[in-house]
Amino acid sequence: MDTPATLAAIIFDSADPAKLAAFYAELTGWAPGYQDDDFSSLGEGPIKLGFQRVDGYQSPGWPDPAKHAHLDLSVPDLAKGVERAIELGASKPEFQPGDTWVVLTDPEGHPFCLTS
């Protein structure tokens, strides 16, 4: 390959792509993009987030060795960022493996981390 591949999007399986995209739009401030009944996207930059409908979707859970990937999001104030994410519909699992970040799960159970 003459030209290396570049990352264009990160896509999450979802039971309700529009609802999950709305959660992440509020959390990140990223603008909504393309949307249809089975797919929603966010972002206008070089990397976008996408959410695709999967019938019978089941979340990976936390902690769970079946978890394959997660987002790390940076916030200016960790405590306020966690509070805001929970207000938007995130959950904070009891198990927290570190002290410089907080593991949360989005409304469909995908884990993500907030750090400052």
Image (tube, rainbow, N blue to C red):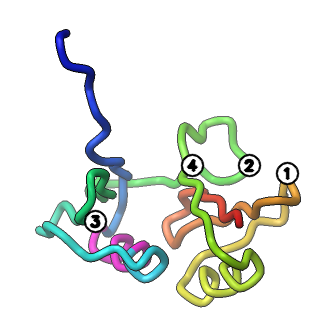
Between the residue at mark 3 and the residue at mark 1, the CA separation in whole angstroms equals 30 Å
Look at 26% across and 44% down and name the residue there.
8
Q: Which residue is mark 4?
A: 60
* Residue 18 is one of the magenta-drawn residues: yes
Q: CA distance from mark 1 to mark 2?
A: 10 Å
Q: In this picture, is 78 found above or below 34?
A: below
- Judged from the image, the secondary structure of the residue bearing numbered disc 2 is loop
Say which mark, if any, is on residue 97. Answer: 1
Horizontal and vertical percent position of residue 7: 31, 38
Residue name at image x 60 percent, y 90 percent = 87
- Residue depicted at 42% across the width and 72% down the height: 24
- Tag 4, which secondary structure? loop
Label 4, label 3: how many angstroms apart (C-alpha)? 24 Å
The residue under label 2 is 63
Image position of 90 with respect to 56: above or below:
below
The numbered dot on residue 43 is 3
The alpha-carbon separation of the residues under discs 2 and 3 comes to 28 Å
Number of other residues with Cα within 10 Å of mark 3, as a class: few under 14, some 14 to 19, many 20 or more: some
Instruction: Please tell me which of labels 2 and 3 falls first in the chain.
Output: 3
The answer to whether 45 appears left or right of 66 in the picture is left
Q: Which residues are magenta?
A: 17-24
